[in-house]
Structure formats: structure tokens, C-alpha cells
Image (spheres, rainbow, N blue to C red):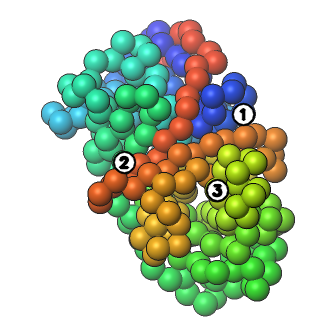
Amino acid sequence: MGRHRFSQVDVFSSVPLMGNALAVIHDADDLSERTMAAMARWTNLSETTFLCRPTDPRADYRVRIFTKGGELPFAGHPTLGSAHAWLAAGGSPARQDVVVQECGAGLVPVRHAGRLAFAAPPLRRSGPVDAELRARVLRVNGLDPEDVVDMAWVDNGPGWIGVELRSAEAVLAATADAAAYDGLKVTLIGPYAADVASQRGTDVEVRAFYADGRDFSEDPVTGSANAGLAQWLIGAGRLPERYIAGQGQVIDRDGRIHVERIGADTWVGGDVCTLVSGHLDLPDA
């Protein structure tokens, strides 16, 4: 058995229990992939991450990201949560203002002066969704075609399909059919009217649904989905270069995602707080 430092953090919220939980296992180089997968199933969270020594000399650390169903090349809230946990454990980045994370999608810069924010990695798949899949996405999410502005692939690793709706209210009214999801990963976005946005402090509402193996979930707050949506819709001129997204209110969360386009980079940021710190005894193989 090996003893490992353990952190559980809440991502995309300054208020504990209102964001998206992440388990982080430190100094995980001695753990086998089988143990990592078993640990991710045991935590029963949407993702569990494992901090390892980097293999790229430009990176400060390497992270492996596991869901209950397998490993992901990239995910957003695990990126911010892992960077927060690494820094809190005494990690010292080579650059003063940026932590460089190595993951399956490559190198991801994470700004750490003030609120943490990651630079969205390039989309692996973009462009229109074919007619048959589009019809299925509408059906399994209970969407009125009249409410749909556009639909596109916004896949930066997990496999998201993005759906732009006419209003935040249409996003909140969606009713996903868990039994029919079967492998889909869909994220919805819609704007608030100006007066409501001012009152709530959010410009748009986002929801994200996915089926991971046999498990269907609505994700509380989703960095990768928000990153893909921002790259698509800022690029199309339908979202401003700076805005705040809300996510999670249908499932009693209150996430806040801060998005900003600077030059060619789209930065996705949020608050992170540590809820649990301790140690775990895990088998080494």
C-alpha cells in the first residue's frame, strides 16, 4: 500500500457545495491505470484526477483525468481543480503567472494570478451536426425546434455537441431523456434578457448532459463544454468576447464560469475552494 495526499475541491464556485466536486490524488506516478480507474469509480464523482511528474519539460505537472467510465484527454473543471490542488500542495511553477499542465490533449496553460483560468485547447471536432443526429439531439432533450438557433460539434476531448437556444429560459426548460441518451454528450446555451442578466450576474445559462457507460448525468458545472461553446459562439460573433455563464441551478448548484477572449486564446476561469484535505492508502498496482 502507498500513502498519497488527497484533496477534494469545489470548482467554479466561491461558495462551498455550489460548484462541481473533484477528487485529486497527488504524487500518483506509482499507481497503475487499473488502480486509477478503480479509484475514480470509488469516488463516484464525475471526474477524479491524478497528479504525476511531467514528461514534457515545458510542463509543471502531468494530470490523468478519469471518469467512472474511463480516461479523458481533457476536461475543464478537472484542469482548474488540479491546478488549484497542485499549487495548494506547494507546487512552484516555472513561470510566475502561468501553470503549464500536461494532459492527454497536450499542454494547457492555466493562469493563476487571481482567479484561475485555463486556455481552451483547440477543438478536435467542429462544424455542423448531420440531420439524423440533430433530430436525435432535439428529441432526447425535449427541445422545440423553434427555440434552436444553431447546433455544432464543440468537441475538445469529451465529445460535446453544442446547442444554441434562443433564451436561457429554453435551456432551463429542457427535459433530457436519460434512457435514450446512450453515449451522447450535449451542452445547451441560451442568453438572458439584459435586465435578468444584470440581476443574476450571468449573461447566459448553460446545461450539460452526458451518458458515461450506463450512467446518465447532468453535470453541475462544465469547463470543457463552456470552452467549446465559447470558441464556437465568440468565433461566430454571437457571444461577446467577455461574459459570465451560469450553470447548475436546475440541480441546486450555482456555478459561475468567467469567459474571456484575449487575442487568439479563449480563457475559461472560475473560483475553486478546497473542502477536504488528507491522505489515502492505495495499492501500488
Indicate left or right for 206 with 49 as reference.
right
Per the image, label 1 sits on a secondary structure element best described as loop
Q: Which of the two discs, 3 and 1, labels the residue nearer the N terminus?
A: 1
**C-alpha separation, residue under disc 2 versus residue under disc 1:** 23 Å
Residue type for callout 1: Met
Residue 190: x %, y % from top left: 68, 66
Other-residue count near label 3 (Cα within 10 Å), few / some / many at <14 / 14–19 / ≥20: many
Residue type for callout 2: Ala
**C-alpha separation, residue under disc 3 versus residue under disc 1:** 18 Å
Q: Is any atom of residue 85 visible in this view?
A: yes
Q: Residue at x 65, y 58 (%)?
A: 204
Above-or-below relation of 181 to 20: below
Would you name the residue on which mark 1 appears? 18
Q: Which mark is residue 203?
A: 3
**C-alpha separation, residue under disc 2 versus residue under disc 3:** 20 Å
Residue 50: x %, y % from top left: 44, 29
Q: Residue furthest left?
A: 57
Indicate left or right for 109 with 11 as reference.
left
Q: Residue at x 69, y 25 (%)?
A: 16
Residue 271: x %, y % from top left: 55, 32
Q: Residue at x 49, y 51 (%)?
A: 259
Per the image, label 2 sits on a secondary structure element best described as strand
Would you name the residue on which mark 2 appears? 119
Above-or-below relation of 216 to 274: below
Per the image, label 3 sits on a secondary structure element best described as loop
